Amino acid sequence: MRSTRRAWALCSGILLYIAAWALAWMLAEVRLPTHMFPHALLGRGSTTAVLAEAGLIALLLSGLALFWSYLTVRSPKRGRRPTVAWFMAGLGSAWFVWLMAGVVRMSEKQSAADLPLAVLLFAANEPPLWGLLNMAALLQGTFLAGLLAAAHYRKLGGGRRARRHAMMPAYEPRLEESRPDEDSGWADTRPMPELPTPAQGLHLSMGQTGR
């Protein structure tokens, strides 16, 4: 059962990155309405517009990662630890594979050198990073989900400290039974009488007929 939960957490991390990348790609292709944004954001491909779009997309991905990760790593049963490490391993593996694919695609793309640096770093549809803020948002959402899952695990009575506190009442009666009674034992002993000192000597009674 434990191996099944770990395998599911690993696969869920991979699926989260694929779903997040597809959502970010679709949102990056959407054109912002010109009547709702100031003139600083109207220039498509400018640094300000790219950062604004990347921030909005990262905010949505952070909420998605928080919801998805919490449902994956949290266990409703007592005694089962959250599988945050395995989930993050799947997330990191998917990001690394897609990063390598982005490097290969960027090397084959001749117009990549003409793009601004902000587009290469933060655009969700441009290799090789596919949006640097997107991966940071996924990690942030997963980290917060891990904290919530750990709090839920402690609430159910998991953890070494909780088990130690649960075992203490079972040992307290035994410790009380093994304690010696204060009114018995050495408490009944009396002090020994003082021995005569050598200076006093020994006086033997000779009786009436003694000389």
Image (cartoon, grey):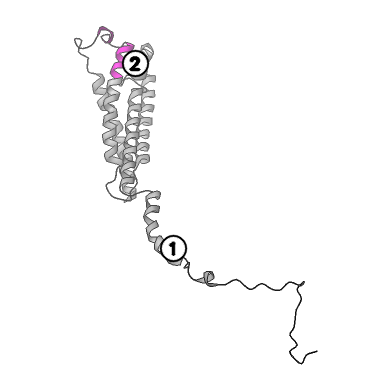
Instruction: Give the residue type that dot 1 points to.
Output: Leu
- Residue toward you, 126 or 150: 150
Residue 82 among those drawn in magenta:
no
Image coordinates for residue 83, horizontal then vertical, percent: 34, 43
Instruction: Give the residue type that dot 2 points to.
Output: Val
- Residue toward you, 207 or 184: 207
Q: Quadrant of residue 178?
A: bottom left
What segment carries the magenta color?
35-54
State the residue position of label 2: 119
**Callout count:** 2
Quadrant containing the C terminus is: bottom right
Image coordinates for residue 210, horizontal then vertical, percent: 78, 90
Disc 1 crowd, CA 10 A, few/some/many (<14, 14-19, 20+): few
Give me the residue at 35% from left, 33% from top: 94
* SS state under label 2: helix
Where 132 sits versus 67, above or below? above
Give me the residue at 30% from left, 50% from top: 78
Q: Which mark is residue 175?
A: 1
Where 109 sits versus 80, above or below? above
* SS state under label 1: helix
Q: Is residue 116 visible?
A: yes
Q: Quadrant of residue 48?
A: top left
Disc 2 crowd, CA 10 A, few/some/many (<14, 14-19, 20+): many
- Residue toward you, 31 or 105: 31
Q: Is residue 112 visible?
A: no
Image coordinates for residue 160, horizontal then vertical, percent: 40, 50
Left or right of 15 on screen, residue 181: right
